[in-house]
Amino acid sequence: MENITAKAPSLSARLAESEKIIIGIGSEWALQPGDKDIRDCRLGDPKQAHIKEAYQALYELVRDRDYYLVTSLTDGAVYDTPFDKSRLTAPCGNIHWRQCSKACTKDIWEEFEVLDGVCPHCGGPLTGNTIKAETYIEEGYLPGWKRYMAWQAATVNRTLTILELGENFSTPTVMRWPFEKIIFFNRKSLLYRVNETFFQIPPEAEPRSISLHKNSLEWILEEKNLAFTALQ
Ligand SMILES: [Zn+2]
């Protein structure tokens, strides 16, 4: 495998020459509930300002580009960002969407639709439509996931950059392992794995990976500033 990481340019230059960009948003970007219930937390809350700023910086770096965003998070924050809703998928679900905890129906409701928290069909308690549900109703995320798979198939032999930002090992089948596989086969691809703790790259992925041992929100904020300073 040709080693392209040694001659990688700055992030903004690399993005500029990329035909396709995959953004993977992981656990470092999770909303911080503090002493609140996570369901009462939104990206627009003053306490989440730093995370909101990082999402905005990330958006500025890729807006108008052919990107797809995938996240393992379930806090729903990504839906409150400027990213194109037809270019994102949250396969682990959304805590703000409700499903029957007994999965008696595949219906999924917005929080405000069922105020008493009881399934209109069987009377059982509702729960979050996430992988933590005993029986996860997958219909919530599948349309976006199928779009992502079709889009991903069109990255073959294209100049592709993958930004894996702050992902841990809770659900490695969503981002970490597929990303390593993609860069193994696509000779024009490059993976940035940025993480305060889980920045390690397996040997077979090394030739087309850049591992950065730092907080991925800070990195994006820095890179956005560098990119926009360079333009002035
Ligand atoms: Zn039910």
Image (cartoon, grey):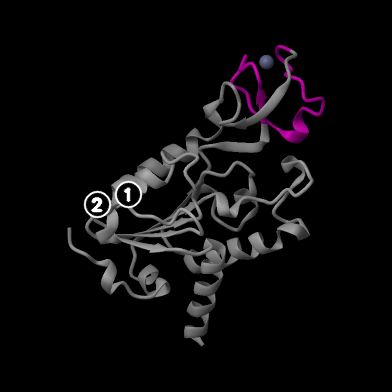
Which mark, by number, is residue 204?
A: 2
* Residue with the mark numbered 1: 180
Q: Can you say whether 14 is above or below 230 in the image?
A: above
Element marked by disc 2? helix
Specify the segment rendered in magenta.
98-122
Image quarter in which the N terminus is found: bottom left
On screen, residue 66 versus residue 134, left or right, reads left
On screen, residue 168 versus residue 46, left or right, reads left
Residue appearing at x 48%, y 33% in the figure: 142
Of the residues shown, which amino acid type is indicated by label 2? Glu
Magenta-span inclusion, residue 117:
yes
Element marked by disc 1? helix
Which quarter of the frame holds ligand 1? top right
Q: Are marks 2 and 1 in contact (CB under 8 Å)?
A: yes
Coordinates of residue 50 in the picture (x, y in percent):
67, 64
Residue 103, located in which quarter of the rendered image? Answer: top right
Residue appearing at x 48%, y 58% in the figure: 195
